[in-house]
Amino acid sequence: MNITDQFVHNVIDFSKRPFSEEVFHHARKCYLDYLGCVLGGSKQNDGKLSKLLSSGLLEKGDCTVFGTDVKLAFRDAGFVNGFNAHAMEMDDGHRYAMLHIEAPLFSAMTALYEKEQLSTDAFYKGIIVGYEVTVRVSRSLQPWHKVRGYHSTGTCATIGVAMATAMALDFDFDQTKAALTAAASSSAGLLELLHDDSEMKPYNVGRAVMDGLTAAYFGSVGYIPPVDVLGGKRGFLNIMSDTQHPEFLTIFDEKDKPSILGNFFKPYPACRHCHSTIDAALQIARDNDIAVSDIEKIKIGVYKLALMGHNHTEVNSSKSAMMSIPYGAVVSLAKKDAGLSQYKEDVVISNEIQKLLTKVEISEDEELTSLSPDIRGSKVEVQTAGRTYRKRVDYSLGEPENPMSDQDIIEKFQGLAAYAEVDNDIASTIVNKVFNGEVLVKI
């Protein structure tokens, strides 16, 4: 069999596995994390969403836009929820796949759940399969996919959404292969969208939801696809990366844990490449009484890939701060906190923060590069007139090796729900319902 046929067979076989309670519980944990992110993002984007709705672009329908009273057609609802879920940079991801997962997948599956009146089992089957596909497709391309400038959340999650939909709706082999083909051809997303003061990075997520759902339904009707859209000479793998790893598509070992168990959660509203630096700086700040005025230099060493788009010290907006490793370090040192409130515009442009940013030196640490992606670490050194403080962090908070507990995720959700002005009692009810296995579309 060619690579595409092998992958489709593997995905169908994977979808039929009897997943453990550990896997389902973790999926529910991801769902609660998603709900916090999408509610927070909806609140943050409220003004511009109103303009988008009045533009006539989005079609009214029966599917929920979280955080609003708006109902849209299912693909449009998926687009808006996907955009909102990634807007605050707090949604989960995977360090080997180098992408975000819950924002596109849960946005697609909640819309599909309403449209097709899915069972809870079909909903979670789609989620678990979607994680597996999204992670494996991205790992088959990395790191050169990112080096080329592709945003893998946009490219690979398009395929993940399509395959999650196919399995939730019990597509046969031919339908699934056609859906995969359409999704691979629709795959897109540029990392340029995260640069400068851009607010458009989440567009890649929303589009992945919309195009993935479109590809799945297109695949269901019987059009004949090419023989090998993934492995062909002008196929997905060869076009999207200089170095491919097709074994992630052709070999599914039942001894391997499902990919959903390898995700990371994010405690801070910043790109994941910033988190190990934030953790190191926070530990220095909290363990020592350092006056900000005494800091003379901040030296940061990170793995090479982290420098791409994340080493800027000119930071003039909240969105730019979310992408900046130096900003994460200085705000952690100055405020002993790197939560949502520390990424507000007034903090970002304050004299204290801007002055500290001029004292940052960031460079590649060859040892950390050699360990990446198994370890995506950071070394932080803070120099004052009288003393030098150093801290190294290999595993950021939220990685499987340094996990956020159920309670951590609950508290994160409650904080985001409060930001979105959700009543405390309602937030508590949501937590209980999610961990009891319910699928929520009305909040």
Image: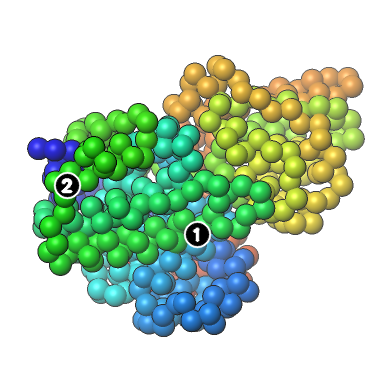
Q: Secondary structure at mark 2?
A: helix
The quadrant where residue 45 appears: bottom right
Marks 1 and 2 in Cβ contact (< 8 Å): no
Considering depth in this image, is 316 or 286 the residue closer to the camera?
A: 316
The quarter of the rendered structure image containing the N terminus is top left
Amino acid type of the residue tagged 1 in the rendering? Tyr
Q: Residue furthest top?
A: 367
Q: Position of residue 256 (x, y in %)?
A: 25, 34
In the rendered structure, find residue 8 and report the number of the disc placed on it. 2
- Does residue 130 appear in the picture of this structure? no
Residue at 85% x, 27% y is 296
Amino acid type of the residue tagged 2 in the rendering? Val
Tag 2: Cα neighbours inside 10 Å, few (<14), some, or many (≥20)?
many
Provide the residue designation for mark 1: 203
Tag 1: Cα neighbours inside 10 Å, few (<14), some, or many (≥20)?
many
Examine the rendered structure and indicate whether residue 195 appears above or below residue 383: below
Residue at 21% x, 39% y is 232
Comes first in the chain, label 1 or label 2: 2
Q: Is residue 197 left or right of residue 298?
A: left
Task: Give the Cα distance between marks 1 and 2.
Answer: 28 Å
Q: Position of residue 430 (x, y in %)?
A: 45, 67
Q: Position of residue 249 (x, y in %)?
A: 23, 38
Residue at 76% x, 31% y is 360
Q: Position of residue 75 (x, y in %)?
A: 36, 70
- Does residue 299 appear in the picture of this structure? yes
